[in-house]
Amino acid sequence: MATKVERIIVPDKDKNRILEFHEEKVGYQGYELYQKHTLISLQTGRGGCELSEWEERPPTRVVEEAPAKTISVLIDTKGTGAFRIYKRKSHQEFEYLGGAGKDTKLVMICWNPEWVFFCNGTLRFRYIIEQG
């Protein structure tokens, strides 16, 4: 689980091999990649992580949570938006931690379930989610 927001830029050459890129940069101990979209546990043979489909989000004024068991988020800002990450301090109080904006094209951020996010502008993003 991440403790700080760290942006990992995904090079163009790795856009079609996201799980492999994630494994190289962050690592998946005890898992093996299967059919480019699922990580299989070497111990149980069951699925470990899965890459969700791209979601396109228009601007919103609400703070959102990532799906349960999210381990990383991939953000494509398309040069028109920002993905801002916060830690909830109370019901209405948030601490800004960082994010991704117009300065990047495709970025990966290891996720912490205590974090929430806010979309500013039009974005595309997808999740790497632990299964089971």
Image (cartoon, helix red, strand yellow):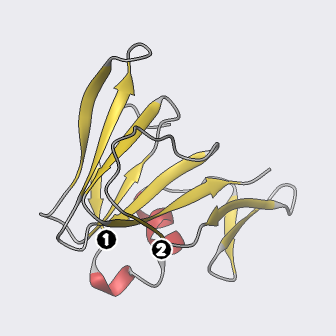
Q: Disc 1 marks which amino acid? A: Val
Q: Disc 2 marks which amino acid? A: Ile
Q: Residue lying farthest top?
A: 90
Query: How busy is the neighbourhood of tag 1: few (under 14 within 10 Å), some, or many (20 plus)?
Result: many
Read off the residue under disc 1.
10
Q: Quadrant of residue 107?
A: bottom left
Q: Residue lying farthest right?
A: 44
- Label 2 SS: helix
Counting from the top left corner in percent of width and height, residue 31 is at: 69, 60
Counting from the top left corner in percent of width and height, residue 47 is at: 78, 62
**Looking at the image, which residue is at 29% across and 58% down?**
8
Q: Judge whether residue 114 can be spotted in this image.
A: yes
Res. 128 mark: none
Query: How busy is the neighbourhood of tag 2: few (under 14 within 10 Å), some, or many (20 plus)?
Result: some
Read off the residue under disc 2.
18
**Looking at the image, which residue is at 44% across and 56% down?**
73
